[in-house]
Amino acid sequence: MSAEVGGISPFVSANFEFVPLKTKTSFGVVRVGAGFKSTSASQSVSVPFSLTYNFSMNRKKDCDAAPQKIFRERFVETGLGLSYISSLGKKPVLYFAPIVGIRQQFIQWGKSEVFFYKIHLTPIYAEQRFRFGAGLSFGRSI
């Protein structure tokens, strides 16, 4: 489960992530969510969807005399996303976006819970033009 500001949504969104593929140093993620934006001029909802793959940046672990209480793992996340945007009184729009970012995970010793944050660049293609996009996510495994 994660919360994201910006990114492929491109609003504030709540997302579920599923990891169908995992190796020792990488994993794939399927993500789907729902976003919302409200201004005085309009209200919009979004349904973001993405497929990403994460490659470990810190394969080499430091040797400590005592095990750490919290393990930190950093990944390069790459992939593709799309988002269906619907605004009241307007034609729906599809956003397509390549995703490139950094994912930092925190795992507590002896537990299976994972906390993470992600920072993404997501140049969005919609309505026959590109625009800059970026996102910040915080999440936790459930």
Image (tube, grey):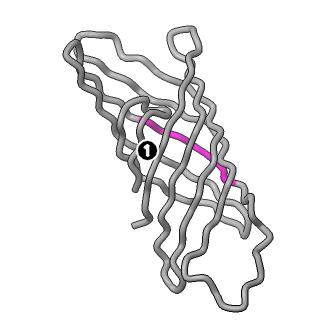
Q: Residue at x 46, y 73 (%)?
A: 113
Residue 38, given in percent of the width and then of the height, sits at: 24, 25
Residue of label 1: 32
Q: Which residue is drawn at 36% across and 16% down?
A: 92
Name the residue at the right extreme. Answer: 60
Determine whether, in the image, residue 89 is placed left or right of residue 63: left
Residue 88, given in percent of the width and then of the height, sits at: 23, 16
Q: Is mark 1 on a helix, strand or loop?
A: strand
Q: Residue at x 50, y 10 (%)?
A: 127
* Location of the N terminus (image quadrant): bottom left
* Location of the C terminus (image quadrant): bottom left
Amino acid at dot 1: Val
Residue 134, given in percent of the width and then of the height, sits at: 53, 32
Instruction: State whether residue 75 is above or below residue 40.
Output: below
Majority SS type along the magenta span: strand
Residue 53 lies within the magenta run: yes
Residue range corresponding to the magenta coloring: 48-54
Q: Which quadrant would residue 123 be assigned to in this image? A: top right
Name the residue at the bottom extreme. Answer: 65
Instruction: State whether residue 83 is above or below residue 5.
Output: above
Residue 50 lies within the magenta run: yes
